[in-house]
Image (cartoon, rainbow, N blue to C red):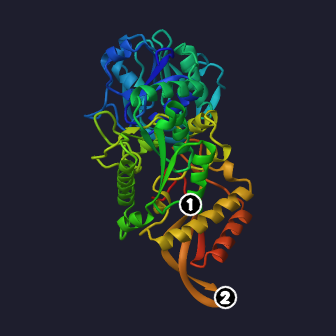
Amino acid sequence: MAEHDLLVILDFGAQYSMLIARRVREANVYCEILPYNTPAETLKSRNVKGIILSGGPNSVYDKDAPHPDPSIWQLGIPILGICYGMQIIAKELKGDVKKGHKHEYGKAELEIDDPENIFAGIPKKIKCWMSHGDSVSKLPQGFKIIGHTENTPAAAIGSEDQKIYGVQFHPEVVHTPQGSEIIKNFLYIVCGIKPTWTTEHYIETACRELKAKIGKEKILCALSGGVDSTTVAALVHKALGNQLTCMFIDQGFMRKDEAKKIKELCSRHFKIHIVYIDASERFFGKLKGIVDPEQKRKIIGTEFIRVFEEEAIKLGEIPYLAQGTLYPDVIESAVPSKVTTAHTIKTHHNVGGLPKDIKFKLIEPLRKLFKDEVRALGKDLGVPDDIIMRQPFPGPGLAIRIIGEVTPERVKILQEVDDIIGSEIKRAGFYKKLWQSFGVLLPIRTVGVMGDKRTYLNTIAVRAVTSVDAMTADWARLPYDLLETISNRIVNECPEVNRVVYDISSKPPSTIEWE
């Protein structure tokens, strides 16, 4: 990446570190996330043009609070600290931080005191997203307050001479509407970075790296038919051609008629060799009696790889496996370590659920991309629009949308329900407006009345959310008429269901998927 200016994000354990990276790349700037304690010499040797210090769950006064290499302050590289990152700036540069008398969480009004540099072209008053308890109480020498809120006098600080800035709020989240502009100002004005990072360059670089890494070896791709795996297949095929074999494993948890559509997409549209494996009986057997969602994910992930290994032997020596792992997968599967203190929310079968003795060497070309970036990449690679705009579908499939034990009968119920929800959402013109919309089969039966007879049948929860990055999400305010149509069709066309409820939970505190 030497031809591109490099921005480094030092990760102090924030759940939003990957989101900061996404905002930076939206500005067409190449960035990497590195551990908070990355040596200053490493940053210097890589000719880093700017540094962003992420937020984090710690207080700067905690016994084990993470601190950066003290030498970074002498590098002369522009620095932007966000939340905890701002507090680290204040403490390390001889300012002071204290526990706030009043914590500030959620939306706040920021009044800008210095409309230059990071606030250039920003309105005098803007909405911002706060999430902090500690506050900067004494500025380091050479710094001044450049923004304040009612509860936080030093909501933004800066030293123009040192090119070091700090903001107590989170410019990376959508709840700070001008946040992207603030980040761009830091990149373009303060750091002087050129916006040269594009999807075209990503394809070129990824193809070069794949050729260098894989050589003349063969590689398998786990194709599911979603935008992630399809884009991976298209990218690997562009780089390696006939060295790629796509394998679709039908574990029995796919959507209605999915297998047929996937086979046609791969063989007819992309002209890629595809191997279809019906392993549904095997997967159902492994999940018999299993109700814990983490166990489900790990079992499915393990069996998924085992099937690949067994089938790959029949195809000859294939040492590599390509997967569609994305940034949100990685961050939500974060494991606490000396590098990050982010908390594990749930594992993903293509990240934390893989067996330790995996026989493949994993290739994850999309590991640093967010969903919208993958869609842009897929479009440039010729992936059909109906695939590019397809809503995210979990790797473990409908198995984690069935609360409780997964059986063929329960999957069949949910397949029909999912098909009804999807068709009605599309018919009403809401499909592309939603991040995800799906049904969840609950592990409870309720009393109902159908045809003057008492029933005791299943309950379905309908889930529909809006989001731009899956890091946060809000429940969709779908029209009552649409919800009524969905409910009526489910109850009338699925004889095993007599009740439909609508999930009005946002993320946080809930996750998008139920398991």
Whether residue 426 appears in this view of the structure is yes
- Quarter where residue 321 is shown: top left
Q: Secondary structure at mark 1?
A: loop
Front of the two marks 2 and 1: 1
Give coordinates of residue 192: x percent, y percent. 55, 13
Q: Quickly name the residue at label 1.
A: 255
Q: On the rendered structure, is 250 left or right of 361?
A: right
Mark 1 Cα-neighbour bin, 10 Å: few <14, some 14–19, many ≥20? some
Front residue of this view, candidates 232 and 156: 232
Identified at 74% across, 53% down, the residue is: 429
The residue carrying pointer 2 sits among few (fewer than 14), some (14 to 19) or many (20 or more) residues within 10 Å by Cα, namely few
Q: Is residue 87 above or below residue 480?
A: above
Kind of residue indicated by mark 1: Arg
- Residue topped by disc 2: 451
Whole-percent x, y for residue 400 in the image: 46, 60
Up/down of 370 relative to 77, above or below: below
Identify residue type, mark 2: Gly
Question: Residue 38: percent from the left, percent from the top?
Answer: 33, 23
Residue 178 placed where, x, y %?
62, 30
Q: Are marks 2 and 1 in contact (CB under 8 Å)?
A: no
Vertical placement of residue 236 versus 505, above or below: above
Mark 2–mark 1 distance (CA, rounded to whole Å): 30 Å
Name the quadrant of the C terminus: bottom left
State the residue in front, 415 or 335.
415
- Left/right placement of residue 36 relative to residue 155 reads left
Can residue 10 be seen at all in this image of the molecule?
no
Which mark identifies residue 381? none
Q: Residue at x 39, y 45 (%)?
A: 351
